Amino acid sequence: MLKPNCLKISFPNSHYKGYNPETTYLKHNGIIVKRFCDYHDSNVIKDYLLGKSESDVVSSILDIEYYSNDFIWENAKNSLSELRKREMITDIIISDFIEENWTKIKLFHSMNHPTNLVLLEVADRILTNLGLPKLNTAERNSQKTNIEIQVILNRKLFKLLYPI
């Protein structure tokens, strides 16, 4: 329980599905199935339920044309829209930063897993809200990571500008 005079700053979970439209939760009786992992590929599930062979499933998900450009951009727009809804009850927003940078800089490892750049931007916005100075450039740059887990196919689809 927070004390009445405690300063509270709220910020949303940095949710973004724009890079990974296939990522979904699989639920059984309303409970997320966590066997193997929390996330599942909706295309694999759909193809399995349609009775496709393993080789057909693999071929389809590796097809560079699997998603239309319209679908990709609509998915990114919908993901940002969902984040904006979540931000309506928070003090800090991050959707503008994501919208401005998602094609220039890798911002998420996967859905709900932002890179350090997003986390540092949230931290800067909290500091600004508190009337404190932002992190300096050296501190921000020291947090960059060389770990890149990105589906190569998405690079072409999204016309991403950042290196893999």
Image (cartoon, rainbow, N blue to C red):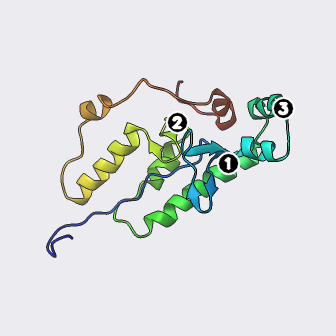
Residue, disc 2: 104
Residue carrying label 1:
73
* Residue 38 located left or right of residue 123: right
Q: Nearer the viewer, residue 139 or 147?
A: 147
Query: Which mark, residue 57?
Result: none
Residue 93: which quarter of the image?
bottom left
Q: Is residue 159 toward the left or the right of residue 133 in the image?
A: right
Of label 2 and label 3, which has the lower sequence position? 3
Instruction: Kindly report which numbered mark, 3 or 1, lies closer to the viewer in this rendering.
Output: 3
Above or below residue 81? Residue 123 is above
List the residue tagged with mark 3. 56
Indicate whether 43 appears above or below 95. Answer: above
Secondary element at tag 1: helix
Q: Secondary structure at mark 2?
A: loop
Query: Label 3 to label 1, Cα distance in Å?
Result: 26 Å
What is the spatial separation of the Cα atoms under label 2 and label 1, in whole angstroms?
Answer: 15 Å
Q: Quadrant of residue 62?
A: top right
Of residues 133 and 152, the one nearer the viewer is: 152
For the N terminus, the image quarter is bottom left
Q: Residue furthest bottom?
A: 4
Q: Position of residue 36 (x, y in %)?
A: 56, 38
The kind of residue on which mark 2 rests is Lys
User: Quick one: label 3, few (<14), some, or many (20+) residues within 10 Å?
Assistant: few
Residue visible at 16% across and 76% down in the picture: 4
Q: Amino acid at mark 1?
A: Trp
Could you tell me if the residues under marks 2 and 3 are in contact, i.e. CB atoms within 8 Å?
Answer: no
Does 87 appear above or below 100?
A: below
Tally of numbered discs? 3
Among the two numbered marks 3 and 1 on one chain, the one whose residue lies closer to the N terminus = 3
Identity, as a three-letter code, of the amino acid under mark 3: Asp
Instruction: Please give the name of the residue rendered at 52% of the width and 36% of the height, measured from the top-left corner.
Output: 104
